[in-house]
Amino acid sequence: MSRRGQRGAAPPGPTATYQTRFSTRRPAIAEGTPQSPAARLPRVTRLLVLAHRIDGMIRAGEIRDWAGAAQLAGVTRARMTQIANLLLLAPQVQETLLLLAPDGPHREMVTERMLWPSTVQTEWTEQRRTFYGQDTALLDHSQLGHC
């Protein structure tokens, strides 16, 4: 029986071989790239930025919905809902989160878990009271860093 008569066998196609050399040197770190964890933005700030980015992608039609975003990000829909709920925070609270300095004194003080009670409240005044009541030092934007 010839090759063509064999079931499932395909004639071999053309192949190419390419050799590449990898550098053993470590690449130089680009200017402006955080070099240590202390220089990174707080996790809650990064999550809020992610929520705004995904919301923009959904509005632009790049992603169908939050479930699609969860699938793309490789997280559960429940986790994506937690991230999306950050968008429900009062604008003043969001501003405070976005202004947290990478190496400021409040970097580790504001956690996502700390925000959960605020996200379930529908009134922004209550959200602010809950959020700022936990640490009144956060009200002073001059201590936060950026701007």
Image (tube, grey):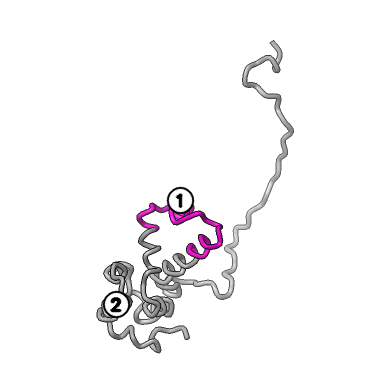
List x then y, in percent, for residue 39. Answer: 45, 75
Q: Is residue 28 left or right of residue 123?
A: right
Q: Which residue is mark 2?
A: 131
Q: Nearer the viewer, residue 23 or 112?
A: 112
Establish if 100 lies above or below 57. below
Q: Tell me if residue 147 comes above or below residue 23 in the rendering.
A: below
Question: Which residue is nearer to you in this view: 61 or 99?
Answer: 61
Which residue position is annotated with label 1?
71
Amino acid on which the number 1 mark rests in the picture: Gln
| Magenta-colored span | 54-80
Was residue 73 drawn as part of the magenta stretch in this picture? yes
Q: Is residue 7 above or below residue 113?
A: above
Question: What SS does tag 1 mark?
Answer: helix
CA gap between label 1 and label 2 equals 31 Å
Q: Residue at x 29, y 67 (%)?
A: 120
Q: Does the magenta segment cover residue 63?
A: yes
